[in-house]
Image: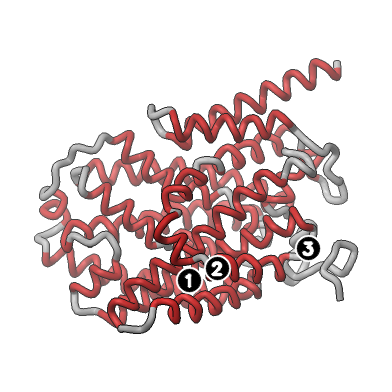
Amino acid sequence: MSEKVGKKHDAEYSLEAVPENCAERRGFWSMFVILVSFTFFSASMSVGAGMANGLNLSNFVLAMIIGGVILSVYTGLLAYVGQRTSLSMDLLAQRSFGSKGSFLPSAMISFTQIGWFGVGLGMFAYPVSELTGINVWVLVVVVGVLMTSTAYFGMKGLAVISSISVPLIAILGTYSMITASRSGGGLTAIFAQHSGEMTLTVAIGMVVGSFISGGTATPNFVRFSKTVKIAVICTIAAFFLGNTLMFWFGAVGGAYTGQSDIFYVMIAQGLAIPAIIVLGANIWTTNDNALYTAGLGLSNMTKIRKKPMTLISGAIATAASLWLYNNFISWLSFLNATLPPVGVILVLDYFLHKQNYARGVEPGRALNVWSIAGVVLGALVANFWQVGIASINAMIVAAVCYLIGEVLSRSKAA
């Protein structure tokens, strides 16, 4: 049977709103572990290690709190909009960017998430190959197929993997961190080893930037939440607690062993098998969420349902994994700065035009040039204006650009 529009919906509702009382609606625990698992990513530990090398303990804690609050407010607003409308990020973009204009945010987030999936595979395959002697390409292909398979099954696959992985990562990672802290003479002693030359503003920017691009995809998951209260609470808790744990794992392990990845920290502690389990679970959960998001973005552009788009995304990311890992991380960092402007425009448009988000209402225009201009200008400011917090600057520029367009369009209508 064709996957084209007009056929019976798929279980992921990739091209329509999630029905209010469908069986796919999820409660607190299911939503919580899915969202926490998204933030459990090894790259965040490297950020924590970098912060620990430049901050004393009090500034490290302060940066995590302030940055975590900013990140939680951003994702919490997106969670509210996603649950209220039951629409994915891409379907929300059809209203705020236009039916054709939405291709820009869909392309950006799909490209970025496919890239991070490939990088994640490399982050797993290289160290495990080094430890076990298994050929790196064998690991890439086997693990890539497994991760793509669970992402193919959508929210059900994410829920199963997340329910297993989140407790494992939290327990083993916390044990490793406590052990390192005790061996190093306590947190204060560990942080006192470093220069403390990083400014608080830079550190807050690192916390916010660590996952604000991924947070833009929040509506993709919370649209399945049973209530808006569950969606917002789970999102805020997940992005604040999940990122905080990753920073602590990276900071303490990095300061104690000189390694930024908990995999190498646990190896140094004689915990080889737990290290492989934690690394695999860590990357698997984030990669599944990334591939799920990429599939929805490609679905919006092609009008083909999510499942085949997920398989295509996984195949591309797996085949290009080692190249992406070795050559593309700097480009992914550049692309990450393009996504916060998307999120702020989605939120603004919803609150200014709620009538356009009612069930059964189709996108009314093909292109909103002010939304697109906001994303482009915001991304340029984030990448080339080295003052303040890059992602915050990008969102301010995008919001101003979008609101100018609103004022002009309303004055023209009057």
Amino acid type at image mark 3: Ile
Label 3 to label 1: alpha-carbon separation: 25 Å
Q: Determine the CA span between mark 3 and mark 2.
A: 19 Å
CB of mark 3 within 8 Å of CB of mark 2?
no
Q: Position of residue 142 (x, y in %)?
A: 50, 81
Instruction: Determine which residue is flagged by label 2.
Output: 288
- Mark 2 crowdedness (10 Å alpha carbons): few <14, some 14-19, many ≥20: many
Could you tell me residue 373's position as x and y percent?
Answer: 65, 30
Lateral position of residue 150 relative to residue 267, left or right:
right
Q: In this figure, what is the number of numbered marks?
A: 3
How dense is the environment of label 3, judged by Cα within 10 Å: few (below 14), some, or many (20 and up)? some
Callout 2 amino acid: Asp
Secondary structure category for the residue under label 2:
helix
Rendered position, 320 above or below 125: above
Q: Nearer the viewer, residue 49 or 359?
A: 49
Return the mark for residue 304. Answer: 3
Would you place residue 312 above or below residue 232 in this image?
below
Q: CA distance from mark 2 to mark 1?
A: 6 Å
Q: Position of residue 58 (x, y in %)?
A: 22, 43
Q: Residue at x 43, y 53 (%)?
A: 329
**Observer-nearest of 372 and 201:** 372
Nearest to the observer: residue 293 or residue 360: 293
Tell whether 328 sits left or right of 84. Answer: left
Residue 284 circle label: 1
Looking at the image, do the residues carrying marks 2 and 1 touch, with CB atoms under 8 Å apart? yes
Snapshot colouring: secondary structure
